[in-house]
Amino acid sequence: MGYSEDEVKKVAELREWLVKQIADREDEVSRLKTSLAIIDNVLKQVSFRPAVALSQPGGKETEYGEVRQLKTKDNVILANAYTAPSSVTIVPVSEIRLNINTAPFQSFFLNRILEGMKGKDQERVDKGELKTDETIDYRVEDDDGVIRKIVITNYRDKERLNEIINTATWVFTRMLEKTR
């Protein structure tokens, strides 16, 4: 069965077009894979958490302004602190399992630091300098004792925020040392 010269020419052109399409797609796939690798690397560095995991009570999402990494002196990332104007959410990275019963979490971080701040705020409420709904508060979310996140509301100023983050870093470092 013979093909005319015109048909052979069209088939050759079609083949050339297909080869070009495949080369273009391979180049596009290569660029997509490179982009995906970059994105995966960034997400690993910041220990990505879905926005749903950072939602406030009642499903209301919070606008986070800054993400700060809590790191050991050896540059091991312990957690990420997602800050908003009136709250900070501290989320340990998935590779690190910190138990709420490991010292000095409850004795120092919760009872001394956060409860101490609550006590100072209550004194200011008693003096009429602060409204009750403006006092610092916190909640710890855990799965079978493993900290998932700590949400601290009404920290009110940068100095307190820094104290919370610095103390959490120190406490998490001590907790991690006890689990090794």
Image (cartoon, rainbow, N blue to C red):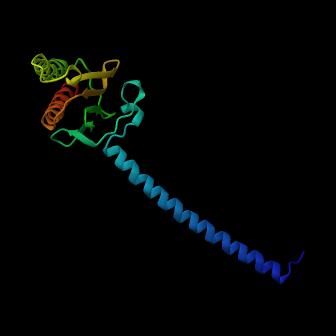
Q: How many marks?
A: 0
Give me the residue at 20% from left, 43% from top.
75
Looking at the image, residue 120 sits to the left or right of residue 141; the answer is left
Quadrant position of residue 19? bottom right
User: Looking at the image, which residue sits at the far right?
Assistant: 1
Q: Residue at x 86, y 78 (%)?
A: 3
| Towards the viewer: 97 or 163 | 163
Judge whether 32 appears above or below 143 on screen: below
Where is residue 47? Give x, y as percent.
33, 40
- Which one is in front, 16 or 100? 100
Q: Residue 51's x, y, as percent?
A: 40, 36
Front residue of this view, candidates 99 and 88: 88
Q: Residue at x 73, y 77 (%)?
A: 12
In-image side of 32 versus 160 (left or right): right
- Quadrant of the rendering where the C terminus is positioned: top left
For residue 97, above or below residue 75:
above
Which residue sits furthest bottom?
5
Name the residue at the front extreme: 128
Tell me residue 101's x, y (percent). Answer: 23, 17
Q: Position of residue 111 (x, y in %)?
A: 15, 18
- Where, by quadrant of the figure, is residue 133 drawn? top left
Quarter of the figure that contains the N terminus: bottom right
Front position in the image: 130 or 50: 130
- Compared to residue 91, the image places residue 25 above or below, namely below
Tell whether 132 sits left or right of 5: left
> Measuring 20% from the left and 39% from the top, which residue is drawn there?
71
